[in-house]
Amino acid sequence: MPTHSRRALLGAGFAAAGSGLLAACSTGDGGTPAGTDVGSGPHATHGPHGPHPAHGHHGPAGHHATHGHGQGHDHGPARHRSDDDPPSGYLSPDGPEVAEAERRRGLTGPVRRYTLTAAEARIDLGGRTVRTWAYDGELPGKEIRVTAGDRLQLTLHNHLPQSTSVHWHGLHVRNDMDGVPGITQRAIRPGSSFDYRFVVSEPGTHWIHPHVGVQLDRALYAPLIVDDPKEPLSYDREWVVLLDDWLDGIDGSTPDAVLAELTRGHPHGGMGHMGGMHAGGGGTRHRRRARGSGARFGASGPHGPSRMLMGGRSRLLGGDPGDVDHPFHLINGRLAEDPETFHAKPGDRIRIRIINASGDTAYRVALGGHRMTVTHTDGYPVQHAGTDALLIGMGERYDVLVTAKDGVFPFAALAEGKHRRSALAVLRTGAGTRPDASTRPRKLFGRLTTAFQLSAAESVRAARRYPDRTIDMTLTGNMARYNWSINGRPYTPSQRYAVRQGERVRIVFRNHSRMWHPMHLHGHTFALPDGGPLKDTVIMLPGRRVAVDFDADNPGLWMVHCHNVYHSEAGMMTTLGYRSSR
């Protein structure tokens, strides 16, 4: 297997299909508590009702799965069956309402074609070669770049030993292209391919990753940049920066083995869409107690040393910074000892698009010697705000502008609360010595900005409107049991929180756990309170309550989940479902 020196990015692979059913907390259609429907009896996870929505035709987007080397059409294996029937009365992911929403986006833009192959690969991280899974043997995966209004066609060839998918993080895609096996499509089997075809309607900084198990914590991710045909910003150069925590292939570690360590011995843990592992774990204090009582937390095993995070703490994150002690942290697939260098000229105005593609780590980010101007978060413009540093949770994106000074400067990403581990890249505009791997620019500890300190730009601020529906989502669980869930019950594919087309919907997130959670909504963008920015991922600190509003304008079945891949795989996810008007 050849060694590839380009960076390959870790993607998000999570689709939790645990046991139990979500207890809802708002009033849904048909008198079901919290808009959640509960089925009973055997359930083939084809979609909302009956066989997989794409089966038997290709629909307006013309998508299909091909078997092996294109021998006819194959939509993948029959979906796993569970104990719960999917509730009736919800729109199908490829129904006429979905097709109509796609038609309204427009079908006149040029077609942009891409091909990706997901396969095992050997990747050079910059002095350390690892065996992992990657897109086309690269880390990060090659950039996908289109313009808003274009039609994107991407064919994924799966050469992995497991089924996989592609999720388009941040895009308002048609529902049957969202890449969630068991909900919007069948998983792409080993040796098969799948065509993703849809209109790209909104500009911004986004990314792709799988939505299967803990595949996120490998090298299966890539940047997805959607240019604005009416771009209002002026800049000379652009730098796309992907942040990642890394353990795959290090001393025998794999993400699946880490999940097994976190969940070992806890039969009530959730399971992923594609048959993930059991779940269990807690705050630092609980971990120490478990070890002292003879539990196997922290012990080395056949799949490498323990990766349990012990003793980490972050005031910014409300205490416990995460679950996993990743041995390395990367920027664009490179270790700090051999960092990527971005070249520019003094005085250049640089747009830096920052994407946190990690599985378990929030990063504090700064560019030494420079003040940053925040222009966008999660792809949408904000009122420009100056800052020294940003706190970026998993799944979040920020765009910033800097005016380059003369010299050599560290771009540092500090793994927040994780024993001062960090990643490094370099901005070079002139002569000078490359920063040392352990460099911590002062700006990291200067003025720090999070999304809650930003305001939406006037051009995207939503019209004021009272919500038509409120859905409560209480984040529950603890590290001692690793029973992460929403409203006290782990995910199952039959869960539905009901919404209807045209409604203004408010989700009230309440974090009743002692861990922070980056909560992500598929297929939509919500507004933070009090004129805050438009986002699809929001950091929920322990004990906090945040109400976010969005317009139900993209019909189908859409996931809401924690973007910590281990939390979502343990069960902290659910589904919003559009009710049929019939």
Image: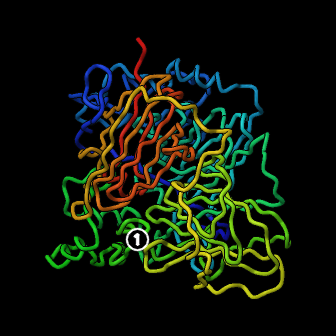
Residue 515, given in percent of the width and then of the height, sits at: 33, 61
Q: Which residue is mark 1?
A: 315
Residue 523, given in percent of the width and then of the height, sits at: 52, 37
Which residue is found at the position 48% from the left and 57% from the top?
Answer: 216
- Colour scheme: rainbow
Confirm whether residue 169 shows in the render.
Answer: no
Asked whether, in this view, residue 95 is left or right of residue 24, the answer is right
Which residue is found at the position 18% from the left and 75% from the top?
Answer: 289
Which residue is found at the position 50% from the left and 29% from the top?
Answer: 465
Label 1 element class: loop
- In-front residue for pair 413/357: 413
32 shown above or below 319: above
Label 1 crowd (10 A; few <14 / some 14-19 / many >=20): few
- In-front residue for pair 199/194: 199
Which residue is found at the position 24% from the left and 73% from the top?
Answer: 285
Label 1 amino acid?
A: Arg
Image quadrant for the C terminus?
top left
Confirm whether residue 139 shows in the render.
Answer: yes
The furthest residue to the left:
293
Asked whether, in this view, residue 18 is left or right of residue 252, the answer is left
Image quadrant for the N terminus?
bottom right
Residue 466, given in percent of the width and then of the height, sits at: 45, 29
Residue 503, given in percent of the width and then of the height, sits at: 47, 25
